[in-house]
Amino acid sequence: MATLTSARDLFAPLGPSYDRWSRLLSLGQDPRWRRFLVSHIAAGPDDDVLDVATGTAAVAIELARRSGCRVVGLDQSPEMLAAGRKRVEAAGLGDRIRLVDGSAERLPFPDGSFDALTFTYLLRYVEDPAATLRELARVVRPGGTMAALEFGLPRGIWRPLWELYVRVGLPVGGRLISPGWHEVGAFLGPSIREFHARLPLRRQLELWRSAGLEDVQARRLSLGGGYVVWGRRR
């Protein structure tokens, strides 16, 4: 299983090119998935939202643009945060978005600090997903929403096509971009398979409820290639 440290080392060199090539290698789906994630956060200009594993701040920017809320974006990669700060400045949202270095497993915030929380592509990399979900829920006020985006495993006739893409398309596409992207392309398929073998979606939803979330729901996107989970803090 890849850890947060190994994920940081893998993705760190990709910060400046991450958004452009992740959009291409996901066949244009990643931005759409992120917009769907943000659509489940009911926030307004007076609300504070925490975006964990913010990376280059794509979700943080979408949150601020959509609702005018204040966003704190947290990530453990200085390289990704540096790219994110440039994006935030270019979007003219420096007064709405603050990016900080930190770990999802030990959030540097008091209980109930935020009106809502989002995270993307995170649980595959943590040693204890149940404990991480409890820590994320801890900083959300009662009644606030928590929502997450992750890669999924398509089912039925779509699974062989997915396997072909992650076994051949992603590594080859990555090699054409750079050695770093080739490494990511070869890594993602096994990482996604291992995560879902270890923690199927049904079990993930159980962990969300055990962490103090209610009305927990999930929606598969793009034939199951991605999914969003959301729930309300008790």
Image (spheres, grey):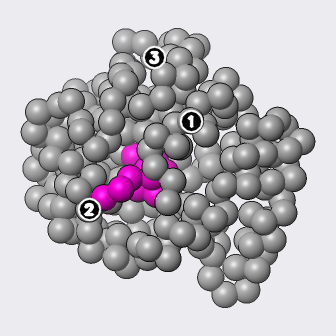
Q: Amino acid at mark 1?
A: Asp
Q: Amino acid at mark 2?
A: Ala
Q: What span is colored magenta in the figure?
A: 119-128
Q: Label 3's element?
A: loop
Q: Would you call the spot at circle 2 few (<14 residues within 10 Å), some (14-19), or many (20 or more)?
A: some
Q: Earlier in the sequence, mark 3 or mark 1?
A: 1
- CA gap between label 1 and label 2 equals 24 Å
Q: Is residue 205 left or right of residue 181?
A: left
In the rendered image, which residue does mark 3 sit on? 93
In the rendered image, which residue does mark 1 sit on? 9
Q: Earlier in the sequence, mark 1 or mark 2?
A: 1
- CA gap between label 3 and label 2 equals 33 Å
Q: Would you call the spot at circle 1 few (<14 residues within 10 Å), some (14-19), or many (20 or more)?
A: few
Image position, residue 21 (x, y; %): 74, 38
Image position, residue 89 (x, y; %): 52, 12
Picture layout, residue 155 above or below residue 12: below
- CA gap between label 3 and label 1 equals 28 Å
- Do tag 1 and tag 2 residues touch (Cβ < 8 Å)? no
- Do tag 3 and tag 2 residues touch (Cβ < 8 Å)? no
Q: Label 2's element?
A: helix
Residue occupying image coordinates x 66% and y 31%: 14
In the rendered image, which residue does mark 2 sit on? 130
The residue mark sitting in front, 3 or 1, is: 1
The number of numbered badges drawn on the structure is 3
Residue occupying image coordinates x 36% and y 22%: 100
